[in-house]
Amino acid sequence: MNDLDALAFASLFKEAHEKCFGHPLTVSLTETESKLFSNQILEHTGLVIGTKSIKNYSSYISNPREKPENPSIATLDTFARYVLNAPYTDEIQRKNKEAHYPYWFQYKNQFRQPGKKMVTKKFLLISGVVLGVLILVVLVVLLYPFQIPKQENFSDNFHSLNENALIKRNWFVNSKDERYWNRRDEYPGYLTLFTLRGDNWPDSSSVPVIKNLLVRKLHADCFTAEAHFKEFFPRQNWQQAGILIMEDTNFIGKSLRLSIMYNDFYGGFPKSREIIIQAITSLGRNFDKPEEIAHQIIFTVDSANESLVAMNLQNSALRIQKTEKQFKLLYANGSMANSAFKELVTREFDMKPKYIGLFALKGFVDSSENIPTRVKFFSLNSNPCER
């Protein structure tokens, strides 16, 4: 690879890594992380980059003294398609329609200065440092003593669910299951997710995954997030739906989950069928036990009151309010759409969420059905960070 290609590739790989894991590349990836990265690229692009290749690229880019890598132009194009949110494809379609690898050249062009000689890495590095210092000085002069908080004000009623419309509204799908994702518009006016097999609850026997997790980046430090659900009545363990906030999208870092769910598991004791609001926090990959910070029974279900429970689950809502390190969790339900929120719990949790998602899941079990979850509204709004 020439200097320009090598520079562009390093930048491209780092962007792709940050999109996948939610944090910058600092060290070589492990085998497991490389596999997760490869799966994410396949799910978003339809194209394959091998686990071993990704691991080798990460070693070279995080430590340039390593043996240089020379990825093929097809591999470079695949990375670029992932970063640039290109339409889903496969190798046959790309060969027939895009054999000129347009996404790689589109990405690389940002490093080219038309009509000028190619600059060296050393010059680029020096220029970048000088420019960065100048920009920092200007920002300090302009912004000091004011601190401008990050703002985020967004709402979605999910009336438009085609892929391009979702991307334009800054949504992306994590761990796509095509069969069920293609049913997302099954109920007009709602986003329909299904309680598929998977979980972000740490499990030594299963890799954490939530299929068709609809995600967007979080930019505000303090915020209120809210989701409304229509006629969601889970009836089997561990069917649930709700809001998930994360430090990264592969559950390596910390996360907080708030959900409406069904429970009848009591470790062998007499069972009671319950609809609960549950909140759990996880410290991430290196901690095998999450903490259940809330377990609120809202209904005990039996054959005599099932229709009454269904009526009161016609409209459900969840809300997360973050102020500095404090999280306030609330829920609402009822036959009327304007039922008041009730506080579930307020808890300190030291995390820096970068992503927020809407999900449905049933844990790592096969016995529960894949039932639909209709989401009718989502909002995300910045809050002042003072209590």
Image (spheres, helix red, strand yellow):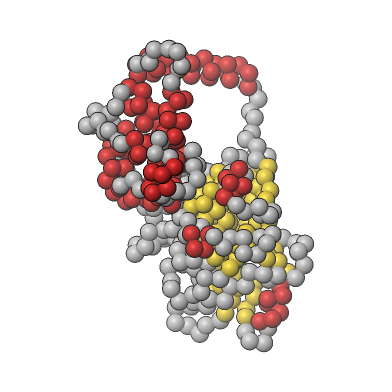
Q: Is residue 167 visible?
A: yes
Is the residue 140 above or below the residue 21 in the image? Answer: above
Residue 155: x percent and y percent?
Answer: 68, 48
Q: Is residue 248 left or right of residue 328?
A: left
Residue 190: x percent and y percent?
Answer: 66, 60
Q: Is residue 351 left or right of residue 49?
A: right
Is the residue 228 above or below the residue 23 in the image? Answer: below
* Residue sticking out furthest to the top: 116
Residue at x 36%, y 31% (from the top left corner):
10
Q: Quadrant of residue 189?
A: bottom right
Residue at x 47%, y 48% (from the top left corner):
88
Residue 120: x percent and y percent?
Answer: 35, 16
Q: Is residue 307 left or right of residue 215?
A: right
| Quarter of the figure with the N terminus | top left
Task: Depth check: give the residue in front, 141 or 312.
Answer: 312
| Quarter of the figure with the C terminus | top right
Is the residue 172 above or below the residue 69 in the image? Answer: below
Task: Depth check: give the residue in front, 333 or 58.
Answer: 58
* Residue sticking out furthest to the bottom: 304
